[in-house]
Structure formats: C-alpha cells, structure tokens
Amino acid sequence: MKPHLIVFAVLIAAFIAYNFFFRIEDDRLNTIVNIILASILFGYISFMAYSLLRKMKK
C-alpha cells in the first residue's frame, strides 16, 4: 500500500504545482486541464480503494 500512497502524493503535488506555478492563461483550457487532473486523482483514489478491498477480502 505504501507505493500507492507515494504515487498519490506525487499526483497531488503535481496538481498543486500546476495550479500555483504552471497555470495556462486561457481560462477555458485551464479549466479543462484542472478537470483532467482532478479526474486522474479521483480515479487513482478509487483504484486504491478497490485494491484495499480486494486485499481485505483475502
């Protein structure tokens, strides 16, 4: 489970770094990139939950 948490921390750091330092000036494109990054984060959270439930079932 530790590698999953490390990858999740890197994804969160990338999301924060993008929003603070690498914002795109076009608001519409910036919103699209934020939605994509947030979708990846929530998808990874669901993957971690699925992995944890599968380990608990065994």
Image (cartoon, grey):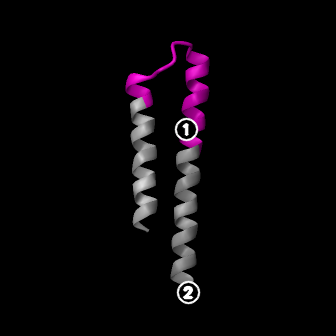
Q: Which quadrant holds the N terminus?
A: bottom left
Give the left or right position of residue 35, taking residue 2 as reference.
right
Residue 22 numbered tag: none
In the displayed structure, 45 sits above or below 26; it is below
Name the residue located 51 percent from the left edge and 13 percent from the top edge: 25
Name the residue located 55 percent from the left edge and 50 percent from the top edge: 42
The residue identified by callout 2 is 58
Q: Quadrant of residue 16?
A: top left
Find the distance from the CA under tag 1 to the CA under tag 2. Answer: 32 Å
Crowding near pointer 2: few (<14 within 10 Å), some, many (20+)? Answer: few
Residue at the outermost front position: 3
Give the left or right position of residue 39, taking residue 11 as reference.
right
| x, y percent for residue 55 | 53, 79
Q: Nearer the viewer, residue 35 or 7?
A: 7
Name the residue located 47 percent from the left edge and 21 percent from the top edge: 23
| x, y percent for residue 43 | 59, 52
Q: Quadrant of residue 15?
A: top left
| x, y percent for residue 38 | 54, 40
The residue identified by callout 1 is 37
Q: Is residue 17 magenta?
A: no
Crowding near pointer 1: few (<14 within 10 Å), some, many (20+)? Answer: some
Give the left or right position of residue 13, taking residue 31 as reference.
left
Query: What element does badge 1 sit on?
Result: helix
Q: Magenta region, mostly helix, strand or loop?
A: helix
Give amino acid for label 2.
Lys
Query: What element does badge 2 sit on?
Result: loop
Q: Which residues are magenta?
A: 18-39
Between discs 1 and 2, the one toward the N terminus:
1
In the displayed structure, 25 sits above or below 48; it is above
Give the left or right position of residue 45, taking residue 13 as reference.
right
Give amino acid for label 1.
Leu
